Amino acid sequence: MLSADAGDRGGPQGSDLRGRVGALTVALARQKQALAGLAAYIAEVEELVADVFDARARTSVNRAVELHEFAAEARRYAEVERAQAARFASSAPD
């Protein structure tokens, strides 16, 4: 609760504070939405990277095991990013 002399101290008035909180809530929701989209995009890129490593492994007998391991690691990163995307999307208010 704001004191009666909040205006005297230069502090926000009650309605102004509610407006600022509302604006920040909307901004936070937009940021979470953007982060969810970015994490989903990163997951897609990691899947493409994994596909490239797998394709390269098929043509490189000497490094096939190592390249398949890189592909598996990229897919693990993709899974982590998908989980992040879901977390950001579910925490964003409607």
Image (cartoon, grey):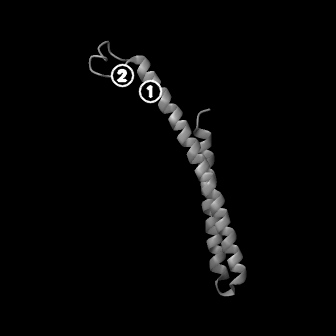
User: Which sits earlier in the primary sequence, circle 2 or circle 1?
Assistant: 2
- Disc on res. 20: 1
> Which residue in the rendered view is the most extreme toward the left?
9
Residue 44's quadrant in the figure? bottom right
**Image x and y of residue 45, in percent:** 63, 61
Tell whether 10 sits left or right of 54.
left
Q: Amino acid at mark 1?
A: Arg
Q: Secondary structure at mark 1?
A: helix
Q: Which corner quadrant holds the N terminus?
A: top left
Q: Compared to 92, does 14 lie above or below?
A: above
Q: Secondary structure at mark 2?
A: loop
For disc 1, the neighbor class at 10 Å (few under 14, some 14 to 19, many from 20) is few
> Which residue in the rendered view is the most extreme toward the top?
4
Residue 88's quadrant in the figure? top right
Q: Is 4 in front, or is 15?
A: 15
Q: Compared to 87, does 64 lie above or below?
A: below
**Image x and y of residue 73, in percent:** 61, 68
Residue under label 2: 12
Disc 2 vs disc 1: Cβ atoms closer than 8 Å? Answer: yes
Residue in the picture at 65% in, 87% down: 62
Residue in the picture at 62% in, 32% down: 94
Tell whether 5 sits left or right of 76.
left
Q: Amino acid at mark 2?
A: Pro
Residue in the picture at 63% in, 55% down: 41
Residue in the picture at 58% in, 39% down: 91
Give the tally of numbered discs. 2
**Image x and y of residue 18, in percent:** 45, 22
For disc 2, the neighbor class at 10 Å (few under 14, some 14 to 19, many from 20) is some
- Disc on res. 87: none
> Which residue in the rendered view is the most extreme toward the bottom?
62
